[in-house]
Amino acid sequence: MRFQTVLEPSEEGGYTVYAPSLPGCISEGDTVEEALTNIREAMELYLEPVEDDCQVGESGCQEGYAMDNRVALEDHRGVF
């Protein structure tokens, strides 16, 4: 799965990055690389089913939704 990300410099220094298609999924880092690493982790956790809320095979649950810990990011520099 690919997700668009928005990377912006923070007023306090460093960078803020978020995924518009995943409401509330936001992270930051001191460098671009750190911010992108952090948003990947945040997105993986965001997409990971919560065991208490969703049992595989249950109506409305999707097996493999956590994407095997792989998230591709797109921002102004391309796909990561």
Image (cartoon, rainbow, N blue to C red):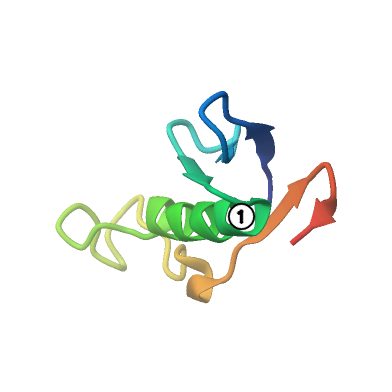
Seen at 35% across and 50% down, the residue is 60
Q: Nearer the viewer, residue 65 or 3?
A: 3
Residue 53 visible here: yes
Q: Quadrant of the C terminus?
A: bottom right
Q: Position of residue 67 (x, y in %)?
A: 52, 68
In this view, which residue lies farthest toward the left? 52
Q: Where is residue 59 drawn, in percent x and y?
A: 31, 53
Q: Quadrant of the N terminus?
A: bottom right
Q: Is residue 1 something one can see in this rendering?
A: no
The quadrant holding residue 15 is top right
Lateral position of residue 13 relative to residue 57, left or right = right
Q: Residue 45: x, y in percent? A: 38, 57
Relative depth, front residue between 13 and 69 = 13
Q: Residue furthest right?
A: 77
User: Which percent across, then down, holds residue 79?
Assistant: 80, 57
> Looking at the picture, does residue 63 appear above or below residue 32?
below
What's the residue at 50%, 56% (across, down)? 38
Front-lying residue, 15 or 76: 15
Locate residue 24: give its quadrant. top left
Neighbor class of circle 1 (other Cα within 10 Å; few <14, some 14-19, many 20+) is: many
Q: Is residue 64 above or below residue 77?
A: below
Image point (57%, 70%), residue name: 70
Residue at coordinates 57% horizontally, 58% vertically from top-left? 34
Quickly name the residue at label 1: 36
Q: Is residue 63 above or below residue 14?
A: below
Mark 1: which secondary structure? helix
- As shown in the figure, which amino acid type bears the numbered disc 1? Leu
Q: Kindly give the residue lying farthest to the front in the view shown.
A: 13
